[in-house]
Amino acid sequence: MRFIRVYLPSLLWILLILSTCLVPGQHLPQISLIKLPIPADKIIHFIYYFALSTFIYLNTLKNKDYSNKSQIFTFIGIICLTLGIIIEFAQEYVIINRSASISDIIANMTGYVTFLFFHSFIERQYNKFII
């Protein structure tokens, strides 16, 4: 129960990712307001996994549930990669009118790697807000 309470923001974010990434293809919106150099779905994947990495990191820091930060980063990376691969397999083999895409997994992991570059800044801002 304690785990759920501590990691609730991360778990809710995972539910958001699952609920939006596992929608059948015919129910996906086809709206394009502006022309972007990167497909909008890749930007969404990036944001989802950057935010997921941030939520897990801050929840873990708050709980002091680690012995060193490299363990946290490895844990987050494994979660992001595993979740992304499971979703892509589900899109390919379970969800109607969807297909797997390696570029989605790359966008997911780009969000995670970007988090790694900014984790110190995120932690400082979090500590300012909390203290």
Image (spheres, rainbow, N blue to C red):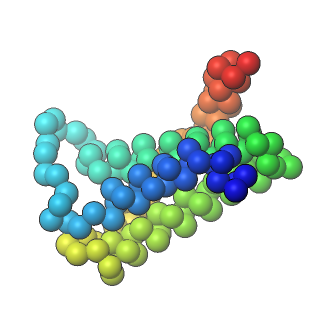
Q: Is residue 125 visible?
A: yes
Q: For the point 15% across and 35% down, which residue is it?
A: 34
Left or right? Give the position of 105 relative to 123.
left
Q: Position of residue 15 (x, y in %)?
A: 45, 56
On-image quarter of the N terminus: bottom right
Q: Quadrant of residue 116?
A: top right
Q: Residue furthest right?
A: 67
Q: Nearer the viewer, residue 88 or 110?
A: 88
Q: Position of residue 9 (x, y in %)?
A: 56, 44
Left or right? Give the position of 28 relative to 42.
left
Q: Position of residue 20 (x, y in %)?
A: 33, 56
Q: Nearer the viewer, residue 67 or 11?
A: 11
- Looking at the picture, does residue 101 appear above or below residue 4? below
Q: For the point 81% across and 49% down, which residue is it?
A: 66
Q: Quadrant of residue 103?
A: bottom left
Q: Nearer the viewer, residue 79 or 130?
A: 130
Q: Nearer the viewer, residue 99 or 129?
A: 129
Q: Is residue 107 visible?
A: no
- Looking at the picture, does residue 29 appear above or below residue 18? above
**Number of numbered discs visible in the structure rendering:** 0
Q: Residue furthest front?
A: 1
Q: For the point 50% across and 50% down, which residue is it?
A: 12
Q: Position of residue 55 (x, y in %)?
A: 58, 42
On-image quarter of the C terminus: top right
Q: For the point 19% across and 57% down, which residue is it?
A: 28
